[in-house]
Image (tube, rainbow, N blue to C red):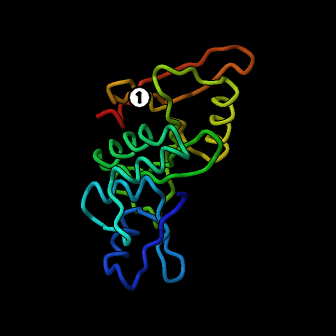
Amino acid sequence: MDTFFLDKEENINWRILVAEGFGNAEGSKVILSPIEVAYLIFKNRISLNPELTFEEIIKKSSENDPLFPLKLTVYVDLREKRFIARTINLGSIDFEVFERESDPLLSKSKYYVMIVPSEKSIPIRALYDALETAKNDGKILTLAIVDQDGDITYYNIESTLKFEVSLRLRRMDVISR
């Protein structure tokens, strides 16, 4: 379950969804990620045909991606804080995030977000690679640490020591409000 398609003719509100940063319009369809679909169904903004429930999407998506529930938790949190988050496939980077009030069709994202369960360690190489990708793309790398209760703490990553197992964290006040 990698993507979902909304038919533009059957979904008259597709332009609003795309303008709000959901999916990508391609031809006669809007392509949505499973996280976007789960969020939109949770918010009663769309329904699928054949009908899939919120729980079914989580169950099926979790089979392919064990971190799906955590990713959805972070996605909902960012959206509730009025950030536009879009799924992205860049190694261990999970989302690109736009500033509040920005237009995702006209502006560039500011952050790359990497989701980490609080009980897991981060391979330093994955962190280093994510930071280098973010720097090369002119983004700020942010770690979203999710604990067992679903509480999220965001940290901006400024640097890593490539050959040492350490990292410097700075609490990200912008997203944590």
Please tell me which residue lies in front, 55 or 131. 55
Q: 142 above or below 35? A: above
The residue type indicated by label 1 comes to Val
Q: Of helix, strand and loop, which one carries label 1?
A: strand
Q: 166 above or below 155? A: above
> Farthest left residue?
44
Could you tell me which residue is drawn at 43 percent across and 52 percent down? Answer: 35
Please tell me which residue lies in front, 83 or 152. 152
Q: Quadrant of residue 146?
A: top left
Residue 56, x across and y down, in percent: 38, 53
Name the residue that disc number 1 marks.
Answer: 146
How many marks on residues?
A: 1
Please tell me which residue lies in front, 53 or 174. 53
Residue 26, x across and y down, in percent: 54, 76
> Farthest right residue?
163
Q: Residues within 10 Å of mark 1 (few under 14, many from 20)?
A: many
Could you tell me which residue is drawn at 36 percent across and 61 percent down? Answer: 52
Q: Quadrant of residue 174?
A: top left
Could you tell me which residue is drawn at 49 percent across and 30 percent down? Answer: 156
Quarter of the picture containing the C terminus is top left
Residue 141, x across and y down, in percent: 54, 36
Could you tell me which residue is drawn at 50 percent across and 40 percent down? Answer: 113
- From the viewer's perspective, tell me whether residue 125 is left or right of residue 11: right
Residue 151, x across and y down, in percent: 33, 28
